């Protein structure tokens, strides 16, 4: 009695665990999303309920330049990761520099807006419900931009010191995920505060 050998062809690639950094960042983004949702809901709930002025329509202008800069910084952050994957450290460093520059421009416009609101219109966090919810929501986002900016600066310094190579691309990708999240949150904040809230 003869036996027929049976061979099993493996058509699927072996399953590997996802990156701990990416999983960790995904969990952080989920937690941060919940916090932002609470602040956005509070802002929406209190729209038009301030008993005194100024109102959003009286003082807010569309931050077009700041928005373009921040959203563009997602493109430059992605370009930095792509460059590092190809071991083009100089290009990665240049893209990181561009990302940081765009983020600083965004923060400059935010600071300018707050200066005008406080000193020209007298709108502080204690003025009315609009002031409280506005500074809480926009301030929370600005804080996340600052945190991202610090991390991007650390990456830039590593690139300038030639302490970064293609093996660090995954870590930079984790950082870029955070930055994309910050940009995505701004789209929501921009829509709720500056478009619907006016």
Image (spheres, rainbow, N blue to C red):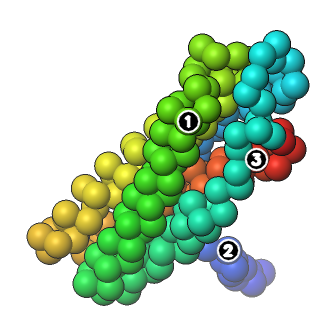
Say few, some or many: other residues with alpha carbon within 10 Å of mark 2 (under 14 / 14 to 19 / 20 or more): few
For the residues labelled 1 and 3, the Cα–Cα distance comes to 19 Å
The secondary structure type at the circle numbered 3 is helix
User: Is 198 left, or right, of 21 in this rendering?
Assistant: right
Q: Can residue 43 be seen by looking at this rendering? A: yes
Residue at image location 55% in from the left, 45% down from the top = 113
Residue 187: name its quadrant: bottom right
Residue at x 32%, y 79% (from the top left corner): 94
**Mark sitting on residue 194:** 3
Density class for disc 1 (Cα within 10 Å; few <14, some 14-19, many ≥20) is few
Which residue does the numbered mark 1 point to in the structure image? Answer: 120
Q: In the image, is 42 to the left or to the right of 107? A: right
Q: Identify the element where label 2 is drawn.
A: loop
Depth check, front residue: 120 or 31? 120
Q: Quadrant of the N terminus?
A: bottom right
Looking at the picture, does residue 122 appear above or below residue 184?
Answer: above
Q: Earlier in the sequence, mark 1 or mark 2?
A: 2
Query: Along the line of sight, which residue is nearer the eye, 171 or 73?
Result: 73
Residue sitting at x 26%, y 65%: 156
Q: Quadrant of the C terminus?
A: top right
| x then y, percent, for residue 167 | 30, 71
In front of the other: label 3 or label 2?
A: 3
Gap in angstroms between the C-alphas marked 1 and 2: 65 Å
Q: Which mark is residue 12?
A: 2
Q: Secondary structure at mark 1?
A: loop
Identity of the residue drawn at 65% across and 50% down = 186
Residue 171: image location, x then y, percent: 37, 59
Answer yes or no: is residue 85 visible: no
29 shown above or below 160: above
């Amino acid at each position: 009695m003869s036996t027929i050998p049976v061979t099993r062809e493996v058509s699927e690639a072996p399953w590997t665990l996802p990156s701990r950094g990416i999983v960790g960042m995904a969990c952080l983004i989920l937690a941060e999303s919940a916090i932002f949702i609470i602040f956005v809901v509070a802002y929406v709930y209190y729209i038009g309920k301030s008993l005194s002025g100024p109102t959003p329509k009286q003082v807010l202008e569309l931050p077009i330049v700041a928005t373009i800069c921040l959203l563009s910084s997602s493109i430059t952050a992605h370009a930095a990761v792509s460059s590092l994957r190809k071991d083009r450290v100089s290009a990665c460093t240049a893209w990181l520099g561009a990302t940081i520059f765009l983020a600083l421009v965004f923060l400059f416009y935010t600071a300018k807006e707050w200066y005008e609101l406080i000193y020209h219109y007298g709108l502080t966090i204690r003025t009315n419900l609009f002031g409280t919810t506005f500074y809480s929501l926009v301030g929370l986002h600005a804080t996340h931009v600052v945190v991202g900016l610090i991390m991007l600066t650390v990456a830039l310094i590593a690139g300038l010191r030639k302490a970064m190579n293609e093996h660090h691309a995954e870590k930079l990708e984790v950082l870029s995920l955070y930055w994309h999240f910050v940009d995505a949150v701004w789209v929501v904040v921009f829509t709720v505060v500056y478009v619907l809230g006016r």
